[in-house]
Image (tube, rainbow, N blue to C red):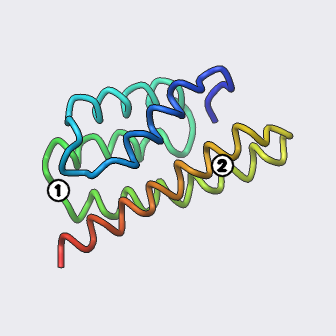
């Protein structure tokens, strides 16, 4: 997972995910995804982030819902690894991001119905 000095990325991501999706600036979303891509190269989350960015840019809601759900699950799992490494504060932020990604997946799913 990201370096513990990257609290700004944690906080900005949490803030973004807590907002109403309709009010979020697409450029801000893409910028945050690209910052995470840079930090997470070589991880199992990196490819999902690239696909997430493409789904957003292409307006593919079904793909977006699936990717958000998968990223939420992987992010929560990564929080467990951080916790095992004794990084409780970082783990809490990672877990919050994972839960917010899962919530975003449910929001997109509801919009599709």
Label 1 CA crowd tier, 10 Å (few <14, some 14–19, many 20+): few
Q: What's the residue at 54%, 34% (across, down)? A: 10
Q: What's the residue at 32%, 46% (across, down)? A: 52
Q: Is residue 21 left or right of residue 40?
A: left
At numbered mark 1, what does the secondary structure look like: helix, strand or loop? Answer: loop
Q: Height in image: 57 above or below 76?
A: above
- The extreme left residue here reads 58
The foreground one among 110 and 56 is: 110
The foreground one among 4 and 47 is: 4
Q: Quadrant of residue 16?
A: top left
- Whole-percent x, y for residue 31 in the image: 32, 26
Q: Specify the quadrant that holds the N terminus.
A: top right
- Whole-percent x, y for residue 80 in the image: 73, 53
Q: Is residue 44 left or right of residue 67?
A: right
Q: Earlier in the sequence, mark 1 or mark 2?
A: 1
Q: What's the residue at 62%, 43% (across, down)? A: 93
Label 2 CA crowd tier, 10 Å (few <14, some 14–19, many 20+): some
Q: Quadrant of residue 53?
A: top left
Q: Are marks 1 and 2 in contact (CB under 8 Å)?
A: no
Disc 2 designates what residue?
78
Q: How many marks?
A: 2
Q: Height in image: 33 above or below 47?
A: above
Disc 1 designates what residue?
60
- The extreme top residue here reads 5
- Whole-percent x, y for residue 21 in the image: 25, 51
- Whole-percent x, y for residue 5 in the image: 65, 20
């Amino acid at each position: 997972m990201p370096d513990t000095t990257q609290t700004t990325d944690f906080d900005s991501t949490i803030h973004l995910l807590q907002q109403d999706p309709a009010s979020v600036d697409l450029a801000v979303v893409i910028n945050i995804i690209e910052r995470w891509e840079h930090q997470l190269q070589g991880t199992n989350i990196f490819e999902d982030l690239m696909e997430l960015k493409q789904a957003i840019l292409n307006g593919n809601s079904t793909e977006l819902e699936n990717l958000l759900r998968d990223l939420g699950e992987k992010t929560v799992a990564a929080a467990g690894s951080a916790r095992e490494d004794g990084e409780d504060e970082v783990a809490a932020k990672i877990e919050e991001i994972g839960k917010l990604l899962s919530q975003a997946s449910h929001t997109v799913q509801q919009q599709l119905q």
